[in-house]
Image (cartoon, rainbow, N blue to C red):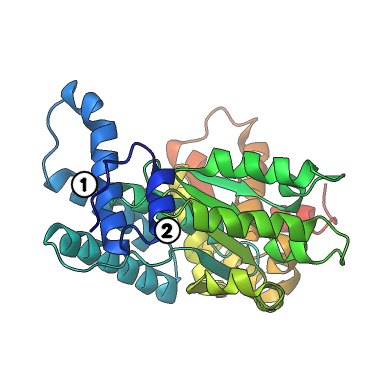
C-alpha cells in the first residue's frame, strides 16, 4: 500500500479507493481502524468489550431472523453473507487480500412478506460485524425522493442519503422512480442514489424493494445501477400454514392464544378467503390486521363480564375471528 496518512472520515477512504491509492483490502482495514478510533473514547467509560461480545450480538440478530416464520432461502443467504463478511475481516487482520464486495441488494416479493423486517435485521447485523458504523434503517419511497421542480429532487435525495449514512437505506417500490417518462425527476433520484452508493462505500448499504417483475424492469432501465448490485433476495408469499404460525406468534407476543376452535376457524378463514391475503395488505399484513381486529372483538365480547377469568382474557375464539373477518369484509358491524 502506498504511504497515506490515517483517514479521518469515510469519504477519504472512498476517495483514495477511487483514485487507486489503496486496494479494497486496504480500504476495509482502514474502515475498521477508523471505527475503532471513533468508538475508543466511549469505550473508556464502560467495561472493556471482549471479543465474544460482538459475536454474541451477531448471534442474537441471527437468532431473531431464525425465529421468523418461513423465508428459508432468505435465511440461508443472510447466513452466507454473515460468514463471508466474517472471513473477509479475519483475512484483512491476517494481512491477506480481502474483498469487501458490494452489499447493495434487491429485495423482490409481494407486500407483507417480511422485506422490511429483514432489512432492519441486516442493518443491525452489519453494525455488529463492523460493516456499518450505526446500523439504523431509513425507509423511503418515491415521494420522499422526487421533488416538484428542478433542483428539488437532488436536495431531497441528498437529505435522505445524509440521514441514512452509517446505516441502511431501504427504497420501497423502487420501480416507481423510473416510471415517469423522460422528463420525470425520478430518474434524477436514481442517478443520485447510484452516485451515493459509490461515494459512500463502507458507510451506506442501499436496498431497492418491490414486486419481482417490476424490479426486473427497473434494473433494465439503469445499467449503472444493475452493475452495482450483486445480491437479490426473493421473498415468497407465505403459505396458509405459515400465516397461522405468524398469527400465533403475534398473539403470543401480546399474551393471547388461539383456542382449539379458534385455530380451526383461522385455518378455514385463510384457506377459504383468498381476498384476505391478496393485494397491498396481503400476507403477514393481512394476518396482523385480522389478529388486531379479533383482539378488539374479544374485548367487546368480554367488556361487560367482570368475572372473566385470566384464561378467558387470553383466549381468541372462533367467534372473535369470524366476527373480525366479517367486519373486514364489510358485512359486519
Q: Are marks 2 and 1 in contact (CB under 8 Å)?
A: no
Q: Few, some or many C-alpha atoms within 10 Å of disc 1 (few <14, some 14-19, many ≥20)?
A: some
Residue indicated by mark 2: 19
Q: Nearer the viewer, residue 324 or 173?
A: 173
Residue at 26% in and 57% down: 26
Helix, strand or loop under label 1:
helix
In this rendering, would 276 be left or right of 243? Answer: right
Which label's residue is closer to the chain start, 2 or 1? 2
Split into 4 quadrants, where in the image is the N terminus? bottom left
Residue at 65% in and 54% down: 192
**Rendered view: 263 above or below 234:** above
Q: Few, some or many C-alpha atoms within 10 Å of disc 2 (few <14, some 14-19, many ≥20)?
A: few
Q: Nearer the viewer, residue 129 or 287?
A: 129
Helix, strand or loop under label 2:
helix
Please provide percent x and percent y for residue 267.
Answer: 58, 70
Residue at 76% in and 46% down: 153
On the question of residue 71 being in view, the answer is yes
Nearer mark to the viewer, of 2 and 1: 2
Residue farthest to the top, as pictured: 45
Q: On the image, which quarter does residue 92 sit in?
A: bottom left
On the question of residue 321 being in view, the answer is no
Q: Nearer the viewer, residue 230 or 11?
A: 11
Q: Nearer the viewer, residue 115 or 325?
A: 115
Q: On the image, which quarter does residue 286 sit in?
A: bottom right
Residue indicated by mark 1: 54
In this rendering, would 168 be left or right of 97? Answer: right
Measured in 3D between alpha carbons, the distance from the residue under mark 2 to the one under mark 1, in whole angstroms, is: 33 Å
Amino acid at each position: 500500500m502506498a504511504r497515506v496518512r490515517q483517514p479521518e472520515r469515510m469519504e477519504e477512504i472512498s476517495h483514495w479507493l477511487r483514485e487507486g491509492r489503496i486496494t479494497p483490502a486496504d480500504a476495509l482495514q482502514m474502515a475498521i481502524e477508523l471505527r475503532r478510533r471513533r468508538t475508543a473514547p466511549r469505550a473508556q467509560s464502560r467495561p472493556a468489550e471482549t471479543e465474544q461480545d460482538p459475536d454474541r450480538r451477531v448471534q442474537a440478530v441471527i437468532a431473531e431472523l431464525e425465529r421468523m416464520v418461513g423465508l428459508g432461502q432468505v435465511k440461508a443467504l443472510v447466513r452466507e453473507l454473515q460468514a463471508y463478511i466474517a472471513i473477509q475481516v479475519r483475512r484483512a487482520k491476517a494481512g491477506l487480500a480481502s474483498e469487501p464486495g458490494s452489499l447493495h441488494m434487491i429485495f423482490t416479493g409481494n407486500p407483507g412478506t417480511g422485506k422490511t423486517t429483514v432489512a432492519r435485521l441486516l442493518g443491525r447485523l452489519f453494525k455488529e460485524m463492523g460493516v456499518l458504523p450505526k446500523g439504523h434503517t431509513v425507509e423511503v419511497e418515491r415521494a420522499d425522493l422526487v421533488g416538484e421542480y428542478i433542483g428539488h429532487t437532488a436536495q431531497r435525495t441528498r437529505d435522505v442519503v445524509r440521514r441514512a449514512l452509517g446505516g441502511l437505506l431501504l427504497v420501497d417500490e423502487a420501480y416507481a422512480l423510473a416510471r415517469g417518462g423522460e422528463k420525470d425527476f425520478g430518474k434524477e433520484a436514481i442517478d443520485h442514489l447510484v452516485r451515493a452508493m459509490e461515494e459512500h462505500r463502507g458507510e451506506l448499504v442501499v436496498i431497492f424493494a418491490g414486486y419481482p417483475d417490476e424490479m426486473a424492469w427497473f434494473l433494465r432501465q439503469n445499467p449503472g445501477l444493475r452493475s452495482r448490485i450483486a445480491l437479490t433476495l426473493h421473498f415468497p408469499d407465505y403459505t396458509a400454514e405459515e400465516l397461522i404460525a405468524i398469527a400465533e406468534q403475534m398473539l403470543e407476543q401480546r399474551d393471547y392464544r388461539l383456542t382449539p376452535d379458534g385455530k380451526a376457524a383461522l385455518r378455514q378463514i385463510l384457506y377459504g378467503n383468498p381476498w384476505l391475503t391478496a393485494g397491498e395488505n396481503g400476507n403477514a399484513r393481512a394476518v396482523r390486521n385480522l389478529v388486531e381486529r379479533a383482539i378488539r372483538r374479544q374485548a367487546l365480547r368480554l367488556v361487560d363480564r367482570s368475572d372473566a377469568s385470566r384464561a378467558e382474557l387470553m383466549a381468541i375464539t372462533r367467534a372473535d375471528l369470524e366476527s373480525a373477518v366479517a367486519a373486514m369484509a364489510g358485512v359486519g358491524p
